[in-house]
Image (tube, coloured by chain):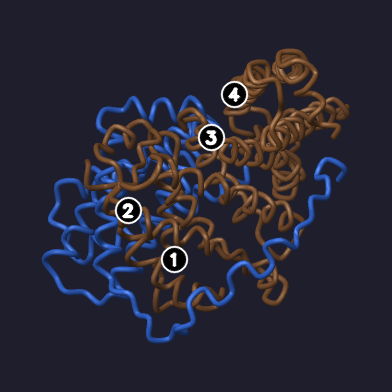
Amino acid sequence: MPALPQAALSVLLDRCLPVLAADSSPETIAAKSHPHCTLSVRLGMAITSPCLASELAACVQQPCSAAHIQQALCALTALPLHRSAAAAKPGCFGEQHVGTALLLAYLCAPGGRICLPDSPAPAVAWRFVEAMPRIAGMLAALAGDSSIAAGRLEDICFMLQVAAAALLMRLPNFRSDSQLAAWATACDAVICLAPTLLQLHERRQPQEPGRQKALRLSHSLVLLLTQASAAANHIGKKHAATGDTPAADKQLVRQLWALHTSMCRLVAWLAADPSGGRAAVLPAELGPRPVFLLKGLSHLRYMLLMEGGCAVGEGLFR
Amino acid sequence: MAALLQQFGLLDRLLGTAELDARLAVQFHAACSAIQGCARLLDRLPLQHSDAFRLCSALALVFGTGTRLLRRDSFTSDPQPATVLKRLDSQLAAAAIVLHQAANPLRQPEAAAAFVRTAGRPQAALSWLLAVSQALLWVPVDLGSARSEPYANCGKDMHASSRASPWLA
């Protein structure tokens, strides 16, 4: 079925994007005369279903064409998120934009096989990574807005998790410090979604606290801690070899510490819940207790503090 | 509910070999609406494994007959875009919610595993998605009513969300 990714991309790029580019107001997007944007959200829901992931990855034989990737980039840099629109017209926000961009991210990066002729291979994937904190921030801001159906926000949360798992887990080794910084910020944003996920779920099902939670943090959490540790290790070794810590590295260390702090807050948030309901946002594979998080955290802390000598730790305090 | 869900299997067998005339197409779209309704109802209730499995099985109807209908609409007849879109919407709404809910390993591990194991089921889903994408491509974009100012509203309120701690709520 190699035609499917191409056809789905074509729907997004040739049908949805021209509409979004011409007028991104919520009224126009929801208009009946060009329903592609609305339908593409459902198309995205169906395509990103985890039960189709392996089949879909198998049918992606070739990387996307450069033209497609350029269009996707334009869409991304202009990704409008309508918090003001949600205020002006209750129930409206840029879910179609977000859904389109996330589906693009998912389709463009199966296996991380993205190529642009003139730039480092995963450049586009990194742009998607850079957009993630914005999307996560919007979801968190909108979660308390009762005029927006919780189900619609859950859909976007779900797609963000799927795209984050595809991108954050499959990206090849970090090529530059700015990429590592973008990666750490995206991971941080995805982790900070935990209370939002719980809030959305409770808004929808207040009467059934014991029901199996549909929305969880992605299991890329674990991999993310390992990779953060590896990054800290890398900085430490570089520092040991050269004897000084450049400004860029200090920034990186700061971001890794911020990630570490968010993780700590997640653990504290989980531990401060007597009923145990909060643990439901953790991935099922990892069990109900945040022990794995503590292990990963201590490893990251060790790498940040010890491996590279004091200079890596100092980066935090300067 | 179980009895209703089993009807979709019967309808699938009935439509699987039949010549799809207008009367049967109406039945099919009614079934899509019913599948969507069942999925939405079960979304509100504690979903039993057996019901999740039956919902997944009901997708065979959408994938099989739906693909045939979409191909027929796109290639042999000449319907109005509005008609195509209405039909697309009914199929997409039914399948998207079931794929997201009953066939989702995060929610229903057993039913999702059964869905993936069933011979040809994921392949049928991909064929159907291809037919849906092609039907969507067949409908032209009407930019007549859209303003010409590109990305007029982009990024206006992007940075309004402060980094207030989400953990305190």
Q: CA distance from mark 1 to mark 2?
A: 12 Å
Mark toward the start of the polypeptide (1 vs 3) = 1
Q: Earlier in the sequence, mark 2 or mark 3?
A: 2
Same chain shared by disc 1 and disc 2? yes
Identify the residue position indicated by label 1 in the image.
A37
Asked which quadrant contains residue A16, the reply is bottom left
Q: Is residue A258 above or below residue A241?
A: below
Give whichever of discs 1 and 2 has the lower sequence position.
2
Q: Nearer the viewer, mark 1 or mark 3?
A: 3
Corner quadrant of residue B28: bottom left
Q: Which chain is blue?
A: B
Disc number placed over residue A227 in the picture, else none: 4
* Label 3 Cα neighbours within 10 Å, binned few <14 / some 14-19 / many ≥20: many
Identify which amino acid the numbered label 3 is placed on: Leu
Q: Residue at x 31, y 52 (%)?
A: A66
Chain A, chosen colour in render: brown
Amino acid on which the number 4 mark rests in the picture: Gln
Above or below residue A284? Residue A61 is below
